[in-house]
């Protein structure tokens, strides 16, 4: 007979971890799927427009040319020293007292704008007077002006702004003049100006060129593996063939990270954003998959119950998932690592079945039953004492267990399988009663006593002679 037990009796303490796993352990769902990727093709993107050439005239008063990353030169025709009339002053470029016969020209170095779009020029300008000064806007020889030009690839100068007279009513706040949508390979900026009197001034500052770089940037997002019951985190990695980029990630449940590599523990679609210089951006996606499929169709069986006939029973585990591993735990520290094993102790056993592909496991209980109840109320009695006249007595065995089996042994090799027997020899008679259901036995002993004193007296009387009359 095969028994399968799945109900839980009172739980011994050695099974507490198992039972906790049964009620409160990991519950996994969702089939495993291959790792996916959603890579975009490499993108040629425009960066955010940014200044790549800027002169702020943070130079000594009287400076007439610039060097380094923002070179520029000046040309001055007029009276006096150029450093006093057409030069840097208080971190601005100042034009003053050139007179009607002079002019000043400021020219930037050649600025490389190849490969850039949305090229734009920006220049801050203002004017000012002192005393009775007045910047003139008329057709006389005393007119004052500030003119802004650009030149592309060595071509002709192009005027893009000019002001005669005061700028913004001689406000001390700069007015920014811009020229955009320029394209080509090399750019030059030219500023021509004249302020004819000592109390008249023009200023320009913050000469800047901005543009948008054309940048080819790529992104590659990968994941180290699949989430399982043993691998509860995986590593996302981002790469790009462009140096100096930054990486960021977004994903399920509001996940964000700002590292090139990051560990995640939730399945789903993750997006890698790669940002290059100036703000060029492209993305790639990768799907983190999860395999937490539990072993299915778990069963645990005991082939019988423990009895005095059957001191060892076989317990067997099975699962519908191929290739699983088995582990048993039971009373007295019992363990086994095979699907089939034998036990000699009754009680609660726990079978843990593990899927080695993903480490996911389930645990089910098995109660091994026991029937080792001995016959009840076993007694052995004797009907009397052996004497010279009572040469046989009856010994009787009894039990309240139905259909019990009886076996007597006693003096002079006495043996019997009846519950009641005649005996003629004194001594101890041992009764063994067997429960036919489980082979368990109980014993009782009865002593048959013998008293032959009457026989000796009678024999003496028989042997005495008669008296003579």
Image (cartoon, grey):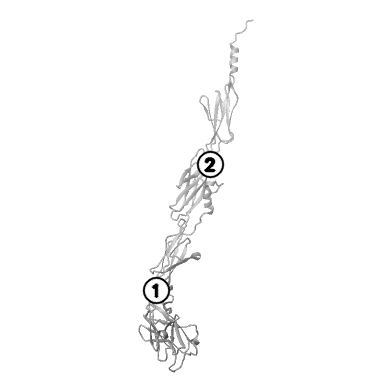
Looking at the image, residue 449 lies above or below residue 203: above
The residue under the point 60% across, 15% down is 457
Which residue is most to the front?
Answer: 80
Which residue is most to the bottom?
Answer: 140
Quadrant holding the C terminus: top right
Q: Which residue occupies the foreground of this view, 4 or 140?
A: 140
The image shows residue 296 at horizontal and vertical percentages of: 48, 54
The numbered mark at residue 181 is none
Q: Secondary structure at mark 2?
A: strand
Q: Which residue occupies the foreground of this view, 333 or 389?
A: 333
Residue 246 in sight from this viewpoint: yes
Toward which corner of the image does residue 244 lie, by quadrant?
bottom left
Q: Which residue occupies the foreground of this view, 210 or 465?
A: 210
Q: Secondary structure at mark 1?
A: strand
Q: Tell me the CA gap for discs 1 and 2.
A: 80 Å
Looking at the image, residue 328 lies above or below residue 49: above
The image shows residue 93 at horizontal and vertical percentages of: 43, 83
Q: Which residue occupies the foreground of this view, 72 or 264?
A: 72
Report whether 159 appears left or right of 17: left
Q: Which residue is mark 1?
A: 215
């Amino acid at each position: 007979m095969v028994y399968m037990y799945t109900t839980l009796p009172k739980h011994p303490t050695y099974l507490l971890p198992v039972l906790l796993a049964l009620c409160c352990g990991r519950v996994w769902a969702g089939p495993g799927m291959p790792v996916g990727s959603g890579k975009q093709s490499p993108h040629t993107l425009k960066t955010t427009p940014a200044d790549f050439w800027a002169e702020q005239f943070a130079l000594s008063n009287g400076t007439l040319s610039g060097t380094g990353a923002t070179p520029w030169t000046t040309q001055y025709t007029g009276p006096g020293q150029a450093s006093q009339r057409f030069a840097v002053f208080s971190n601005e470029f100042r034009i003053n007292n050139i007179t009607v016969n002079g002019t000043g020209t400021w020219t930037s170095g050649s600025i490389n704008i190849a490969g850039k779009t949305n090229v734009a020029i920006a220049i801050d300008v203002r004017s000012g007077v002192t005393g009775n000064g007045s910047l003139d806007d008329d057709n006389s020889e005393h007119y004052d002006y500030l003119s802004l030009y650009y030149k592309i690839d060595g071509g002709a100068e192009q005027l893009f702004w000019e002001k005669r007279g005061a700028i913004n009513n001689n406000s001390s706040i700069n007015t920014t003049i811009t020229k955009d949508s320029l394209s080509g390979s090399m750019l030059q900026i030219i500023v021509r100006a004249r302020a004819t009197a000592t109390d008249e001034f023009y200023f320009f500052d913050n000469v800047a060129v901005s543009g948008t770089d054309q940048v080819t940037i790529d992104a590659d997002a990968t994941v180290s593996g699949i989430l399982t019951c043993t691998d509860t985190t995986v590593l996302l990695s981002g790469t790009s063939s462009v140096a100096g980029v930054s990486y960021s990630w977004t994903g399920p449940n509001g996940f964000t990270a700002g590292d090139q590599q990051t560990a995640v523990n939730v399945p789903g679609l993750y997006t890698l954003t790669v940002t290059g210089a100036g703000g060029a951006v492209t993305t790639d996606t990768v799907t983190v998959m999860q395999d937490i499929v539990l072993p299915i169709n778990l069963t645990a069986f005991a082939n019988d119950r423990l009895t005095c006939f059957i001191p060892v029973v076989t317990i067997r585990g099975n699962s519908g998932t191929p290739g699983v591993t088995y582990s048993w735990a039971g009373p007295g520290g019992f363990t086994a690592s095979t699907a089939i094993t034998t036990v000699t102790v009754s009680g609660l056993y726990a079978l843990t079945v593990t899927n080695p592909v993903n480490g996911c496991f389930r645990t089910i209980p098995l109660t091994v039953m026991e029937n080792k109840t001995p016959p009840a109320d076993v007694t052995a009695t004797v009907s009397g004492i052996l004497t010279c006249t009572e040469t046989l007595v009856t010994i009787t065995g009894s039990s309240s267990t139905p259909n019990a089996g009886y076996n007597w042994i006693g003096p002079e090799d006495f043996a019997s399988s009846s519950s009641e027997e005649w005996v003629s020899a004194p001594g101890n008679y041992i009764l063994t009663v067997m429960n036919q259901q489980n082979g368990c036995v109980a014993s009782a002993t009865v002593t048959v006593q013998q008293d032959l004193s009457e026989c000796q007296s009678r024999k003496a009387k028989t042997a005495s002679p008669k008296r003579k009359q």
